[in-house]
Image: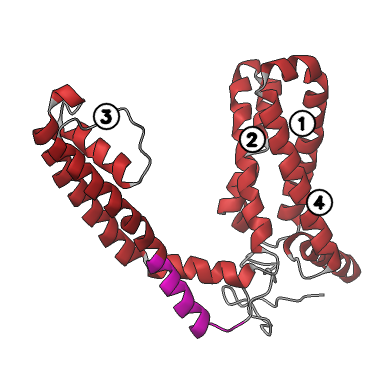
């Protein structure tokens, strides 16, 4: 009995190492293969949307999608089996993404009317973030995430200020230009302000008066500076994070709770206290 338990433990540990860790050669090859499959599946979704191509190669696309879906299904089951507590993965963000991106094809097979759900497969592209998270850039990705989180208050204040400014300028443009130039309401003026301030410039609404055009020039010049502000806030915080946080994080994932981002010298999981390397 003990031999059987040891065999299962070793088998699960080996499977977990392959699937969840990118520091090992086998783990790297697994991630590369998964990366290729994700890109191939997205390409299939795109090609299926081209009516002429789908008519000519429908059978090939259909078979290819089934092959990829079955492989993803096997991967999903393997991820569950490699963990002591599978629900930690099943109800995690990536677990839900994996499930939602796999089941549409099965549903379309069982319920013909649900063929439209196949477009949900496009969310497989989000799975690439997991792969990028588990390679050598994991440390920088973590710093960027922390920088965005630490900058949230400043960015929120900035966005709120821009919204107030947009309402004021939009109201002024409504009064200056009027319906003759397309500014039929204050919301229309706010829409024009945001479009102009972000330098998008659809051109569907154009000021006709000299005063309106002068305000437009001011708003456009302001736009260049406004776009740079959030970037500067995050960049400054990112630089600060890089100086303060020099701890190297590896791709070790806890086989018990599936927590990531452990330090290089960590022996136990920071989340549940489980031994990280059980082999």
Which is more toward the observer, 279 or 233? Answer: 233
Q: Going by the picture, which residue comes out furthest to the front? A: 210
Q: Give the mark nearer the N terminus: 4 vs 1.
A: 4
Q: How is the image coloured?
A: secondary structure
| Comparing labels 4 and 3, the label whose residue is closer to the camera | 3
Helix, strand or loop: magenta stretch: helix
Q: Is residue 197 left or right of residue 135?
A: left
Image spot of residue 247 (x, y percent) = 59, 83
Dividing the picture into quadrants, the one containing residue 133 is bottom right
Residue assigned mark 3: 205
Image spot of residue 192 (x, y percent) = 26, 36
| Comparing labels 3 and 2, the label whose residue is closer to the camera | 3
State the separation of the CA atoms marked 4 and 3: 49 Å
Q: Give the mark nearer the N terminus: 3 vs 2.
A: 2
Residue range corresponding to the magenta coloring: 232-247
Residue 71 vs 117, above or below: the answer is below
Residue assigned mark 1: 65
Whether residue 215 is in magenta: the answer is no
Q: Give the mark nearer the N terminus: 4 vs 2.
A: 4
The answer to whether marks 4 and 1 mark residues whose Cβ atoms lie closer than 8 Å is no
Q: Residues within 10 Å of mark 3 (few under 14, many from 20)?
A: some
Residue 156 vs 271, above or below: the answer is above
State the separation of the CA atoms marked 2 and 1: 10 Å
Which is more toward the observer, 207 or 69? Answer: 207
Q: Secondary structure at mark 3?
A: loop
- Which label belongs to residue 33? 4
């Amino acid at each position: 009995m003990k031999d059987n338990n040891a065999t299962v433990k070793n088998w699960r540990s080996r499977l977990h190492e392959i699937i969840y860790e990118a520091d090992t050669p086998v783990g790297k090859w697994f991630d590369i293969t998964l990366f290729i499959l994700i890109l191939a599946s997205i390409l299939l979704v795109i090609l299926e949307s081209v009516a002429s191509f789908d008519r000519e190669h429908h059978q090939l696309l259909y078979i290819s999608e089934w092959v990829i879906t079955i492989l993803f299904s096997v991967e999903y089951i393997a991820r569950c089996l490699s963990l002591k507590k599978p629900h930690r993965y099943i109800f995690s963000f990536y677990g839900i993404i994996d499930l939602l991106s796999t089941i549409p094809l099965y549903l379309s097979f069982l319920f013909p009317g649900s063929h439209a759900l196949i477009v949900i497969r496009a969310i497989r592209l989000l799975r690439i973030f997991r792969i990028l998270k588990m390679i050598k850039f994991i440390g920088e990705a973590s710093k960027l995430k922390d920088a965005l989180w630490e900058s949230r208050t400043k960015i929120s204040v900035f966005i709120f200020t821009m919204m107030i400014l947009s309402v004021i300028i939009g109201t002024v443009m409504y009064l200056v230009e009027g319906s003759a130039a397309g500014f039929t309401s204050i919301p229309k003026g706010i829409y024009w302000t945001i479009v102009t301030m972000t330098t998008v410039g659809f051109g569907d609404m154009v000021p006709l008066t000299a005063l309106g055009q002068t305000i437009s020039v001011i708003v456009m010049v302001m736009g260049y500076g406004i776009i740079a502000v959030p970037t500067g806030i995050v960049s400054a915080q990112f630089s600060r994070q890089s100086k303060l946080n020099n701890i190297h994080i590896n791709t070790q994932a806890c086989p018990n709770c599936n927590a990531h981002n452990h330090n290089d010298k960590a022996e136990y999981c920071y989340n549940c206290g489980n031994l990280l390397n059980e082999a």
